[in-house]
Amino acid sequence: MSLRALDARAAGASYRAVAEALFGGERVTGEAWKTSSLRDATIRLVRSGLAMAAGNYRRLLGHRADA
């Protein structure tokens, strides 16, 4: 989901549009956007995607730093 969110943002989608694509429009419109937990989750997903794109994708493989 993080990479999907990052791709959408990179293509110019707003956080709200990303949230609608990931969680469904009905869920997004069910809450006030500025205080929505889905807004916070979407922003976190984009940040996580940015971290993965910067090289932290190895976490997906279960790579241990001390190994």
Image: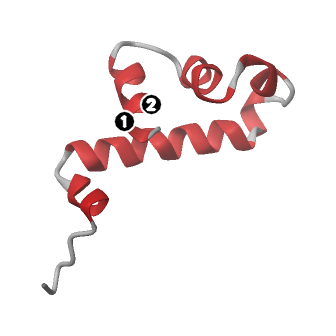
Residue at the location (21% across, 70% down)? 63
What number of labels is visible?
A: 2
Mark 1 belongs to which amino acid?
A: Leu
- In this picture, residue 41 sits left or right of residue 67: right
Tell me if residue 9 comes above or below residue 53 in the rendering.
above
Quadrant containing the C terminus is: bottom left
Tell me if residue 53 comes above or below residue 60 in the rendering.
above
The chosen color scheme is secondary structure
Q: Residue furthest top?
A: 12
Q: Residue furthest left?
A: 67
Res. 22 image quadrant: top right
Res. 10 image quadrant: top left
Q: Residue furthest front?
A: 61
Residue at the location (60% across, 44% down)? 41
How far is mark 2 from mark 1, CA to CA? 5 Å
- In this picture, residue 51 sits left or right of residue 65: right
Q: Residues within 10 Å of mark 1 (few under 14, many from 20)?
A: some
Q: Nearer the viewer, residue 32 or 8?
A: 8
Q: Position of residue 35 (x, y in %)?
A: 77, 39
Residue at the location (24% across, 52% down)? 57
Q: Position of residue 43 (x, y in %)?
A: 52, 40
Residue at the location (31% across, 42% down)? 50
Labels 2 and 1 touching (C-beta < 8 A): yes
Marker disc for residue 3: 1
Query: Mark 2 highlights which residue?
Result: 5
- Secondary structure beneath disc 1? helix
Mark 2 belongs to which amino acid?
A: Ala
Marker disc for residue 27: none
Q: Position of residue 5 (x, y in %)?
A: 44, 30
- In this picture, residue 3 sits left or right of residue 66: right
Q: Position of residue 23 (x, y in %)?
A: 66, 29
